[in-house]
Image (cartoon, helix red, strand yellow):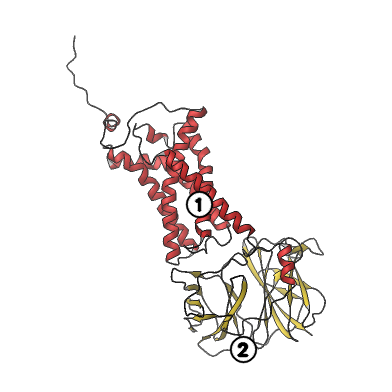
Amino acid sequence: MISTEQTHPTADETAMESPPGHVSHEHHELPTSGRALDAVALSATLHCLTGCAIGEILGMIIGTALGLSNFATIVLAVALAFFFGYLLTSMPLLRAGLALGAVVPIAFASDTASIAVMEIVDNAIILTIPGAMEAHLRDILFWGSLSFALVVAGAFAFPLNRWLIGRGRGHAAVHRTGVHGGPPVRLIGAIAVAMALFGTTVLVAEAFDGDSGGHGEMAAHDQASAPDPVRGLAASADGLTLALATTHLTPGEPGQLRFQIVGEDGRAVRDFEVEHDKRMHFIVARDDLTGFQHLHPRMDADANWTTAITVPEPGRYRVFADFKHEGENQTLARDVTVAGAAQRRTLPVPSRTATTGDGYEVRLRGSETAAGRPTELAFEVTRRGQPVEVGDYLGAKGHLVALREGDLAYLHTHPSGGEHGRDAGRDGGDAIRFETEFPTVARYRLFLQFKHDGEVHTAAFTWNVR
């Protein structure tokens, strides 16, 4: 007996009808092991990597061009990476005739875990590479870091995709539709290999570049042989000028400092080298050596540097732009007025111990300092009487700013001793060592910054030079 009952195609069968264009609808049984599974996982990984790369690069370009903060730039890049990752998965399915309501769950199931892993690894690497987040769009470090980070992120996502597909999850959701589209796998694979080679070459060159801001013992020794003179007494030096757009601030209210470094031709300078992990250090101190702040501005596409700042008390403040240009360390300074009646404070008496206000005690060891002679300063950090092993901060185990009482002359200091300025202390903790030269008999204010438990702490000393 012949049945006259009509059958209707299911949604999956409808999706597998031949659409126009290059999209393929061949439906194969998904492998669960071996090289066949590797091939499917690699294809899925490169597919996700394409979307992530488009979103990540676009987000970094927009964030850097607009001068957004590191956090805002990363949030934007991550959001765009997810958007383009889902978009590349959805487009072939939509062209094949699937309804949007059916495509969205498939895209989420297919790509969410893979993109999340890529974004975590990618941005962690970018944040770890010194100077990467501060690099300008024209800097090769920007593109090299981004290329290297994306490829490593893809390598981390591959085993996850393989594990998910082998269990019928993740990108298997797309394969079950029978719709196969997107960018050519071989082309994306070749681009990924080129990105890996390019990114690795850039980072290796940056690491071995003598001007990259390294703090090895050899670099410290070379610097020690020719101490820098005092800096920060003028707004112009060696053909460079600190052009400060902000000259007044309101006490207690969030503000923004904006400035450029201008050359002799009147044009803004764009080329800055990484020094102590940053291309620009911005130091702020009131003329009585209180209110110390150490900031890291960002440069926009027009070579304007900006940084957020809140100054709690009125007074006259000196701002120092500390940077490296054409192999030379420079410190340019100007004054900023914070409106109101200032109450000047007397400089604390010289002492070998200082506290940070949050439970840390720092002791300064060493003999009395003589003017005009190289000096080593060693600091030991304890907390509740126990030695503290400090973490890395700005490429070393500590950062030291020395300012002279009266004219606020800025002294160059650099780590010395063992690994990045760290040697064993008397009680088993760290001794953070620096080398400098105090040019004249005077009192100086020393601001030591170190990192512990993920936070940066500052200890201030008054130091007599005889």
Visible residue check, residue 239: yes
Q: Can you give x and y, in whole percent of width and height, for residue 426 in the image? A: 82, 64
Q: Can you give x and y, in whole percent of width and height, for residue 124 in the image? A: 54, 53
Q: Is residue 201 left or right of residue 192?
A: right
The residue that mark 2 highlights is 344
For badge 2, the amino acid type reads Arg
The picture quadrant where one finds residue 228 is: bottom right
Q: Can you give x and y, in whole percent of width and height, for residue 277 in the image? A: 60, 64
Of the residues tagged 1 and 2, which is closer to the observer? 1
Q: Is residue 436 left or right of residue 152?
A: right
Q: Is residue 36 above or below residue 297?
A: above
- Is 250 in front, or is 245? 245
- Is 372 in front, or is 194? 194
Query: What is the residue that sits farthest to the left in this orientation?
Result: 4
Callout 2: helix, strand or loop?
loop
Q: Is residue 453 above or below residue 105?
A: below
Q: Residue at x 51, y 63 (%)?
A: 135
CA distance for labels 1 and 2 = 51 Å
Q: Residue at x 19, y 21 (%)?
A: 6
The residue that mark 1 highlights is 147
- Is 144 in front, or is 159? 144
For badge 1, the amino acid type reads Ser
Q: Can you give x and y, in whole percent of width and height, for residue 208 in the image? A: 64, 58
